[in-house]
Amino acid sequence: MNKKSEEFFRRMLEFLPSTEAAYRKSIATYGELLETIIIEDIFMHEIIKLLREERNIELLGSIFKYFEEISNDEDAHLINIFSITVLEILGNDRSILRTARNYMGPKTIELQIEADRDLGRKI
């Protein structure tokens, strides 16, 4: 895992401290940090929950501001992992995606549309 990915996981744990036990358990279970599993099964589960409830608007704003930073980063590995986990999952539920778009920046929206196209989803 590169430094950008390490930074991503650190920041996500700061945003979502309630996920730390599951994060550590996943590493213990698999013997290593499996990026896609932790993002999909742990972080995105919490983010989807936040989007459904849409009560903690400040936290959602901070998370998606960070997602916009990632979307504008030049690290190909981080962008790829971000696209195939975070952005694809957001596209799985159109109502969640509509809510998420209220918080997304322009580059994040662009990458999310691209992720949907890559999956063959109609936009």
Image (cartoon, helix red, strand yellow):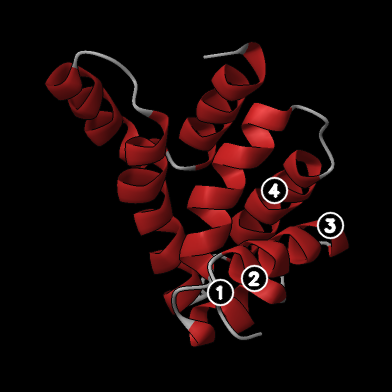
User: What whole-number distance in Å separates the C-alpha atoms at marks 1 and 2?
Assistant: 5 Å
Q: In this view, does 90 lie to the left or right of 101?
A: left
User: What whole-number distance in Å separates the C-alpha atoms at marks 3 and 4?
Assistant: 9 Å
- Which of the 4 image quarters holds residue 2? top right
User: What whole-number distance in Å separates the C-alpha atoms at marks 2 and 4?
Assistant: 19 Å
User: Which one is earlier in the sequence, the residue at label 2 or at label 4?
Assistant: 4
Is label 1 in contact with label 2 (beta carbons under 8 Å)? Answer: yes
In the image, which is nearer the foreground, mark 3 or mark 4? 3
- The residue where tag 3 is placed is 107
- The residue where tag 4 is placed is 67
Of 56 and 29, nearer the camera is 29
Tell me the element at label 2.
helix
User: Which one is earlier in the sequence, the residue at label 3 or at label 2?
Assistant: 3
Q: Which mark is residue 120?
A: 1
What's the amino acid at mark 2?
Answer: Arg
Of 42 and 1, nearer the camera is 1
